[in-house]
Image (cartoon, rainbow, N blue to C red):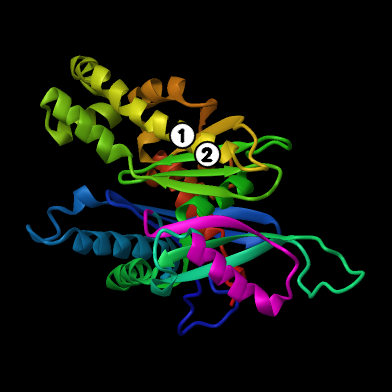
Amino acid sequence: MKLLEGFTLGALPLIGLDIGTTAVKAARIRRKGRNILVTGLAWAALDALDAVVAEGSPVSDKTALAIWRCVKILHDDAAVCSVAGPDVAVRTFEFPALPRKELASAMELEAMQVCPFEISEGAVAYQLLRGPAGRVGKGESTERMLGIFAAAKNTTIRQRRELCEEGKARCVMVDVDGLALLNCMEACNLRDEGESALVLNIGSTYTNVAIISDDGLPFVRDIAYAGDHIISHICHSTGSPKKTVAAALISSDTDPTMLERVRPSLKEACSTLADRVSETVRYYGTRKSGPAVDRIFLCGGLSQSLAAMDALVPMLPGEALLWDPLTILPCTRSVRRNKAAEHGPAFTVALGLALRMLRDVHD
């Protein structure tokens, strides 16, 4: 999705801005050739802003304040942000060889067929991964064209941009959570040759599933079941307040009695997530080039809960490993000492967004 109003292409530094419902995460990266260095991190939890924002203010106000804090910490305001959920779609496509000038119209027709919303109400961006760019005539190659496209409703994109503006950030590019995850995975060199790898990013509202294998065609889905749903299930089952349950899952000094009390309902809640992940993996396997998933890399806020991971991991359809990109990517000393680095598994989307450059945007 092209969002470059008021900007020119060049060496403009970009920060990755992951705007969540419980926290805003931001990352800055310096690139020299193929070498990258994480030079800045910022974390702003929304619940810590209750005393700052007037009581009764909408969440967007707190979110805007969290964005402003991250921008101020990193001293950069040109940002790449991302979207996810039912108003976003990422799909692969395969066409007969077409001239470049006809590809855009073919892409729009394809998006109309597979997107869960009216394309007239959204924006579509695509990338050709393999295949000829010119017209195929008599005696020429008949290689087919393979690629991916991302589509999102204009209202979703506009709301994200307006939120950035409220927080004094300039949104110069909009990405998709799942593609940012795969971008970060590539930078970390996680996937072995011949392997099919899945990233499971468990946030508060959505769980992002992103799969990549040797065919190079990404598979991205968002599951509307994540940390908040798991906590709500436990609250309903145990009658415990939300803050108490959340603290029991995340805090390292949790009362063992409380943790034992929530374990049965935690396992039930995690089984629902595991079932939906398994369904997604089975669907992926129906693709012509979709092999079985070999390894699963866990990240996101809930992945930092040892209790939740103990319940979830045995139920997942593959070997599962916790992924903290900050233990793999080169970081400056200040980043290593940054308290935000304690949330490393939650920074995967922000880092993947920070790896984007303006040259990644195409007409």
Mark 2 crowd level (few <14, some 14–19, many ≥20, 10 Å Cα): few
Q: Residue at x 74, y 75 (%)?
A: 99
Relative depth, front residue between 318 and 203: 318
Pointer 2 with pointer 1, Cβ within 8 A = yes
Number of callouts in the render? 2
- Marking on residue 283: 2
Q: Position of residue 39 (x, y in %)?
A: 52, 56
Note whether 296 is above or below 314 in the view shown: below
Q: Quadrant of residue 93?
A: bottom right
Reading the image, the residue beneath label 1 is 279
Residue 341 visible in the picture: no
Q: Residue at x 46, y 82 (%)?
A: 5
Relative depth, front residue between 126 and 342: 126
Q: Position of residue 181 (x, y in %)?
A: 52, 49
68 to the left or right of 282: left
Q: Position of residue 66 (x, y in %)?
A: 28, 59
Q: Is residue 206 magenta?
A: no
The magenta segment:
85-113
Q: CA distance from mark 2 to mark 1?
A: 6 Å
Task: Identify the secondary structure beneath mark 1.
Answer: helix
Which amino acid is tagged 2? Tyr
Note whether 128 is above or below 44 in the view shown: below
Q: Give the residue at the far right of this rendering.
A: 139
Q: Position of residue 344 (x, y in %)?
A: 44, 41
Q: Residue at x 75, y 60 (%)?
A: 144
